[in-house]
């Protein structure tokens, strides 16, 4: 070694520092790669992504290979720096060289390359994967021996390297991924994706049409009234019942009733031949599950029943889809039944309207964890049957009861928080 020129030794030392930087940076780059993006690109045939994904299937072996190479390079760099120091200034030079090489490896071989790799992992990790694809064969015996010892220690504490390949995201984690996607996903698409995740939190009772608002054909009505109802109906499918919705006979599609309606004389009972048997939905069914049920049963309309079998309301496929894509109307406020905006910015609403409907269409944030309707929310807050004129404040939403009927809130005036703020400014 004494015969080798110092210039050659300094050159070798620089190469070793570069190799140290490569091992340190590539370790951080490969370990911080986005696994889901990597998997997507690998499925598209991107070769660097496929190689990196293959290496990351066993991270214990990859880390072992990187550490073997990094430690060998660092040890060689320290030894070479010490030799250079001895040749330049004896023992004092060796001590100075040891300190200098430690500082150089820390700055140029650790901090700088790892920072670069953390900021741009694909730029560092993907090219490095080809190098490790080649190195894994000559380093394989050392890596296997090292992994046998380290994996044995890990199993003593209950960790299995074989189980570390893939970890699925929870619903909340997936929600965070979608919310933080930024410009990569348009805002409207983000809302739709988040709405799909929210389907499992809502049940059919949250969106159903209450039984007292179900529009259907009552066979006990006169033939002329039923005929006019069929001709002027705004709904495609109508329940068919006799006297009460509790005596439900089926569901008819108006397209199939044309030949019966034009017959003279018109016989309402002939509608029973065209009716399809009703489809019942247990209360408490999550919306995501009911969406699949509609698809499997080839249905578009169902009746929500309680534990006693009594009909509580009606749910359609359109209702669930609107939870995902929003209301099918250009003006959301106009789509909500029995909601009227006043000139002062307040809203006059029907007490039976659901809170979720108001929140979704008007962008409000009324609580949905308790009662489902405005009537229920007011009664819960007051813990009493109110009288017209009574007011209650819920999350800065001022709710004033304007009309009562049969111990229930029939109509209420709601002033959103921004309306109150604007009124204060105007005053």
Image (spheres, grey):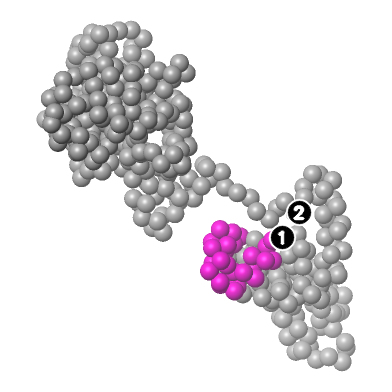
Is residue 36 shown in magenta?
A: yes
Are dots 1 and 2 in contact, CB under 8 Å?
yes
Magenta segment boundaries in residue numbering? 32-57
Q: Is 283 placed left or right of 152 in the picture? A: left
Residue 367's tag is: none
- Characterize the magenta stretch by its predominant secondary structure: helix
Residue at point 36%, 9% (across, down): 383
Q: Please tell me which residue lies in front, 84 or 390.
A: 390
Q: Please tell me which residue lies in front, 157 or 55.
A: 55
Q: CA distance from mark 1 to mark 2?
A: 8 Å
Disc 1 is placed on an element classified as helix
Q: Please tell me which residue lies in front, 334 or 190.
A: 334
Disc 2 is placed on an element classified as helix
Q: Residue 249 at what x, y percent from top left? A: 33, 24
Residue 59's tag is: 1
Q: Is 237 placed left or right of 303 in the picture? A: left
Residue farthest front in this picture: 264
Dot 1, crowdedness within 10 Å: few (<14), some or many (≥20)? some
- Residue 158 seen anywhere in this rendered image of the structure: yes
- Residue 93 seen anywhere in this rendered image of the structure: no
Q: Residue 230 at what x, y percent from top left? A: 18, 32
Q: Residue 251 at what x, y percent from top left? A: 31, 31
Q: Which residue is mark 2?
A: 161
Q: Residue 170 at what x, y percent from top left? A: 56, 43
């Amino acid at each position: 070694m004494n015969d080798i020129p110092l210039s050659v030794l300094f050159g070798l030392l620089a190469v070793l520092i570069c190799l140290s930087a490569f091992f340190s940076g590539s370790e951080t780059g490969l370990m911080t790669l986005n696994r889901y993006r990597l998997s997507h690109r690998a499925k598209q045939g991107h070769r660097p992504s496929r190689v990196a994904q293959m290496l990351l299937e066993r991270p214990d072996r990859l880390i072992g290979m990187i550490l073997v190479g990094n430690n060998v390079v660092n040890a060689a760099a320290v030894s070479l720096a010490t030799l250079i120091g001895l040749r330049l200034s004896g023992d004092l030079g060796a001590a100075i060289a040891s300190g200098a090489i430690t500082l150089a490896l820390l700055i140029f071989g650790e901090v700088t390359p790892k920072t670069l790799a953390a900021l741009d992992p694909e730029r560092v990790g993907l090219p490095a994967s080809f190098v490790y694809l080649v190195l894994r064969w000559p380093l394989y015996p050392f890596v296997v021996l090292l992994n046998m010892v380290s994996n044995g220690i890990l199993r003593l504490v209950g960790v299995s390297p074989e189980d570390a390949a893939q970890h699925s995201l929870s619903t909340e984690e997936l929600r965070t991924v979608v919310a933080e996607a930024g410009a990569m996903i348009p805002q409207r698409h983000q809302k739709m994706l988040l709405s799909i995740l929210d389907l499992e939190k809502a049940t059919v009772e949250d969106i159903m049409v209450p039984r007292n608002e179900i529009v259907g054909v009552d066979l006990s009505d006169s033939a002329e009234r039923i005929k006019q109802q069929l001709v002027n109906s705004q709904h495609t499918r109508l329940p068919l019942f006799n006297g009460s919705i509790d005596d439900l006979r089926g569901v008819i599609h108006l397209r199939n009733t044309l030949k019966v309606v034009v017959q003279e004389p018109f016989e309402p009972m002939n509608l029973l031949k065209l009716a399809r048997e009703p489809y019942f939905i247990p209360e408490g069914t999550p919306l995501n599950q009911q969406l699949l049920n509609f698809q499997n049963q080839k249905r578009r309309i169902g009746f929500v029943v309680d534990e006693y079998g009594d009909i509580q309301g009606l749910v359609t496929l359109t209702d669930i889809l609107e939870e995902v894509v929003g209301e099918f109307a250009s003006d959301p406020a106009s789509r909500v039944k029995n909601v009227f905006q006043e000139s002062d910015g307040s809203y006059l609403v029907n007490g039976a309207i659901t809170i979720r409907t108001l929140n979704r269409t008007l962008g409000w944030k009324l609580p949905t964890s308790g009662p489902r309707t405005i009537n229920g929310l007011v009664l819960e807050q007051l813990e009493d049957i109110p009288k017209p004129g009574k007011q209650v404040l819920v999350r800065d939403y001022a709710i004033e009861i304007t009309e009562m009927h049969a111990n229930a809130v029939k109509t209420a005036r709601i002033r959103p928080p921004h309306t109150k703020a604007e009124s204060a400014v105007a005053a």
